[in-house]
Image (cartoon, helix red, strand yellow):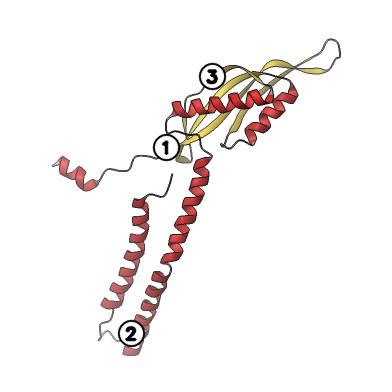
Amino acid sequence: MKVSAREKKILYAGIVIAAAILIYYAATSFSPGDGESLADKVTTQDSLLRRYKELIAREDFYKRRIEVAENNIDKIQARLLTGNTATAAGMELQRILDDFADRSGVVITSKNPHQERKVADNDSLTKISMRIQIDCQIEDLVDFLIAIKNADKFLKVEELIINTQQSTQTKQMILRRPLTMTVAGYISVLPPEPADQTTAALYVR
């Protein structure tokens, strides 16, 4: 999910356009006979030129900001599930959960992948979730949850259903197994770029 070359060009073009507007304004606004003194006009032009120079000088600043943004995006991208399809991401999520279960002493007795869904406030993210049933002791469950929380990928436990019952012997509450939980991860799917309006118009004609 890097900042594309097209987006960089748009940003740089914005800087150039802003500078061009300042230059144009400086050139066209210098017209005698409108009642403004020559000294005031020179002061205005000087102010506009200083603003133009400041804008050009900040080009490196904007480049650094882009680099920082790209690094942050790379870090976020690394925590998303691999692949641009729900099938590939679902297989990776299943593999991760299986690995955590083996290391935690948890037995996954069933797996039920859910339909992928777009994240409401981010069109480029799709949620991949899976509902599983597990058989384990409470200590193993804690280890399993910690492993999910500390995963390299960003995983979220969306649902955890724990049923208990009272032991007839000790009168203490014990877990009723299996337990049910839903775990979600995310993939990045960039929306398609809008069609070129000029090209589209040619086809219409």
Please give the name of the residue rendered at 44% of the width and 62% of the height, measured from the top-left corner: 62
Disc nearest the viewer among 3 and 2: 3
Amino acid at dot 2: Lys
Mark 3, residue position: 112
Marks 3 and 2, how far apart at CA: 74 Å
Left-right relation of 43 to 116: left
Are dots 3 and 2 in contact, CB under 8 Å? no
Residue occupying the point 81% across, 13% down: 167
| Secondary element at image label 2 | helix
Q: Is residue 150 above or below residue 138?
A: below
Helix, strand or loop under label 1: loop
Where's the C terminus, which quadrant? top left
Instruction: Give the number of callouts.
Output: 3
- Which image quarter: residue 63? bottom left
Q: Which residue was labeled with disc 2?
A: 41
**Labels 2 & 1 near each other (Cβ < 8 A):** no
What amino acid does circle 1 point to?
Val
Q: How far apart are marks 1 and 3 (CA)?
A: 23 Å
Q: Work out whether 122 lies above or below 24.
A: above
66 over 46 or under it: above or below: above
Q: Is 37 in front, or is 114?
A: 114
Q: Name the residue under label 1.
A: 189
Crowding at mark 1 (Cα within 10 Å: few <14, some 14-19, many 20+)? some
